[in-house]
Image (cartoon, grey):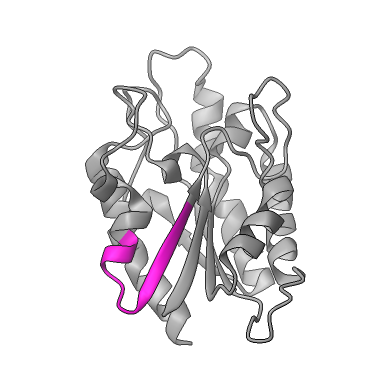
Amino acid sequence: MKQILAFGDSITWGSDPHTGGRHGYGDRWPVALGGGLQDAVVFAEGLRGRTTVHARHSACVEMRGDAVLPMLLHSHAPLDLAVIMLGTNDVYEGHATHLIRDGLERLVEIIRHHPWRLPEAASPKVLLVSPPPMSLCADPDITPEKVAQSEGLAAAIAPLAARLDCGFFDAAQVARASDADGYHLEAADSRALGEALQTPVSGLLTV
């Protein structure tokens, strides 16, 4: 049985842009991804507000991805693949694109240098997913500049993935944030993202 970690933020958690609650189980993209894979299980680790490596000091829990990733790697070991989709909250908080790219690189470093302490454990493959672009909405904090920055993340993440020999997928191919709140996915788009990821994930698992 192949084991996959889906590491992300509220989009991975399954936030509903209309209610502020959570999508039904089958509408969350990690669940839709797992439903199309044979002999594989997806561990969904989505946290509302999570960033790549940047602190959010007003948050009620630790939001830095680099701070919690080692614990999750140890908890779910052994892993065959880690799917990372982060960056939306970094944009929302005003961090520059090159800092988001560098944060993702740090997450890949953590995965590849983790002390697994299991005889059968090897460093898992990594799939970097550029998150769905934000959309303008009634929230004044989601500015045209932030939307444009989110639309440009794929152009920064794709070369990083190539340089680090990671898989890459641009979520904008199949999904965009709802204009109901500007950064979360409608249920159908969340499912579509999970289904679209089945092909690149299957490819990485069979290499």
Q: Quadrant of the N terminus?
A: bottom left
- Left of 161 or right of it: where is 194? left
Residue 81 image position (x, y, % from top left): 53, 71
Looking at the image, can residue 68 be seen?
yes
Give yes or no for residue 34 being in the magenta stretch.
Answer: yes
Res. 76 image quadrant: bottom right
**Label tally:** 0
Res. 18 image quadrant: top left
Res. 13 image quadrant: top left
**Residue positioned 45% across, 80% down in the render:** 205
**Residue positioned 33% across, 64% down in the render:** 34
Give yes or no for residue 81 being in the magenta stretch.
Answer: no
As drawn, 57 above or below 155:
above
**Residue positioned 42% across, 63% down in the render:** 42
Image: magenta residue range: 33-44
Looking at the image, can residue 132 be seen?
no
Residue 9 image position (x, y, % from top left): 51, 41
Residue 141 image position (x, y, % from top left): 53, 16
Q: Of 129 and 40, which appears nearest the observer?
A: 40
